[in-house]
Image (spheres, grey):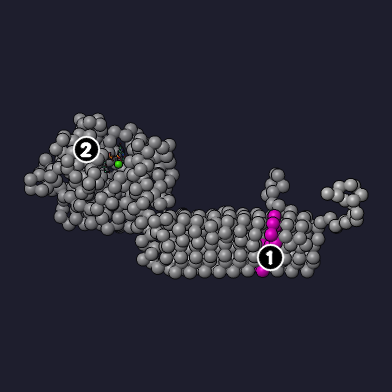
Amino acid sequence: MYNCAIILAAGEGKRMKSSTPKVLHKVCGKEMVNIVIDTIKISGINDINVIIGRGADKVKDATINNNVSYSLQDKQLGTGHAVMCAKEFLKSKKGTVAIFTGDAPLITKNSVEKLIAFHNEENYKATILTSIVDNPDGYGRVVRESSQEVSRIVEHKDCNAEELKINEINAGMYCFDIESLLRSLDKLNNNNAQGEYYLPDIIGILKNEGLKVGAVPVEFEETMGVNSRVQLSEAEKVMRKRINLMHMENGVTLIDPDNTYIDLDVDICNDTIVYPGNIIQGNTVIKENCTLYANSRIEDSFIDKNVTIQCSTILKSKIGENTTVGPFAYIRPESVVGKSARIGDFVEIKKSVIGDETKVSHLTYIGDAEVGSKCNFGCGTVVVNYDGAKKCKTLVGNNVFIGCNTNLVSPVKVNDNTYIAAGSTITDEVPEGALAIARAKQVNKEGWVEKKGKKK
Ligand code: UD1
Ligand code: CA
């Protein structure tokens, strides 16, 4: 059976009160619509059409790397109308179309596969996913006949008192036989409380034609829709729990999984220990045996094995094995720190390379620099990389000892095996093997205090 999918993502999301289209709000670091696309893909469907409308350009931009096609819904006249806008996508196809919404990101591969298998094996013309819930407020209700078969779906706003009591809800995810769907779309009307063309009405239409309509129940946790910020936080909580469980099952220790925030695409190897308050984002990879003490933020970075990080921020950078970082270090994008290095407290590294076994232990700024291995930066060293107009580079070789409170005024080069005296402001190249001193010589004026009458 040929399977394709449609994702409804054209709605405004009024209840979010946001200038960002609803489906682009993120759950564990990823846009909801991209989470849905990923789940459909790993379930084996690659022909995916996204219906865009509100913020169409933004939604397109955010999904462009996912290899999907798009249909435009100019006016948001309802979920049924949204599918009408995909007629071009559907018209030459025979088989099954699975329809999902871009605002329900918790659906799992398992359930998608179950829905499709059930629909195709039993030869249904339509199959819906449903959930039994305690509080069905806002959801479409599933009305079943005496035979227990689904007969139609009634939107919350169109329910009578009896229907409001039904606690089986429409998850807003379906499979349809493409031909039957296309035929029925023409029969939809908007005679309802919201004046919209409802996709769920197709179920009633097919049923009235005597065709087979099925339902697959799944846990509410998977079908929860996000229409507000409160629901967004609930979805985030569920997703976070799943992610953290997966890492623990893979051999990562999370000291307090309720207070550990790991994005969907983060990769962590076994025997790494993560203390509470860590925020690990984007495409970060953390290799084995690392210790992340409390309260770091690590984004799009590669952390090699045996690294210890305390209370620091690391952005789009690489940290070599056995290195320690922090507390309170700030490693900014495009930095590469070598093996067995030390980046200590109140150190900022920006777009710089730091060689193996180099120590930058405290209160230092290194920007736009290339530093070799086995160097030692004294406390309070500043790479003066900005002259007010442009950024310049500093090069530091291997085995360089830089005394405390040194300025390296870029562009400048410090060659291998050199020493720089504390308090120096280095503006000229330091040749290999030299000691550079660049500060005023000390003068002691004997008896000066007495002479000036300043003695206290
Ligand atoms: C919908 C279902 C409801 C179900 C619920 C599950 C309808 C009429 N109702 O209600 O039965 O219980 O989902 O979460 O379908 N969209 C468009 N174009 C439009 C309108 C909506 O693309 O013109 C998209 C939205 O971006 C969203 C999805 O369709 O991703 C669902 O729309 P929404 O308005 O959130 O529907 P619900 O009221 O939640
Ligand atoms: Ca919704």
Vertical side of 116 occupied by 151: above or below: above
Residue depicted at x 20% and y 34%: 158
Question: Disc 2 and disc 1: Cα gap in Å?
Answer: 69 Å
* Cβ of mark 2 under 8 A from ligand 1: yes
Q: Report the magenta residues as a range.
A: 371-383
Q: Nearer the viewer, residue 146 or 162?
A: 162
User: Which is the main secondary structure of the residues drawn in magenta?
Assistant: loop
Instruction: Name the residue beneath numbered marker 1.
Output: 376
Is residue 10 visible to the viewer in this orientation of the structure? no
Residue type marked 1: Asn
- Count how many numbered circles sit on residues in the image: 2
Is residue 221 visible to the viewer in this orientation of the structure? yes
Q: Can you tell which quarter of the image residue 313 is in?
A: bottom right
Q: Nearer the viewer, residue 127 or 417?
A: 417
Vertical side of 139 occupied by 247: above or below: below
Report the disc number at residue 454: none
Q: Secondary structure at mark 2?
A: loop
Q: Earlier in the sequence, mark 2 or mark 1?
A: 2
Q: Nearer the viewer, residue 452 or 143?
A: 452
Query: Of tags 2 and 1, which is closer to the observer?
Result: 1
Residue 232 in picture, x, y percent from top left: 36, 45
Q: Secondary structure at mark 1?
A: strand
Residue 96 in picture, x, y percent from top left: 23, 50
**Which residue extends farthest left?**
146
Circles 2 and 1: CB distance less than 8 Å?
no
* Magenta-span inclusion, residue 428: no
Instruction: Name the residue beneath numbered marker 2.
Output: 155
Residue type marked 2: Glu
Residue 102 in picture, x, y percent from top left: 33, 45
**Which residue extends farthest front?**
456
Residue depicted at x 40% and y 52%: 28
* Apparent side of residue 92 relative to residue 434 in the rendered image (left or right): left
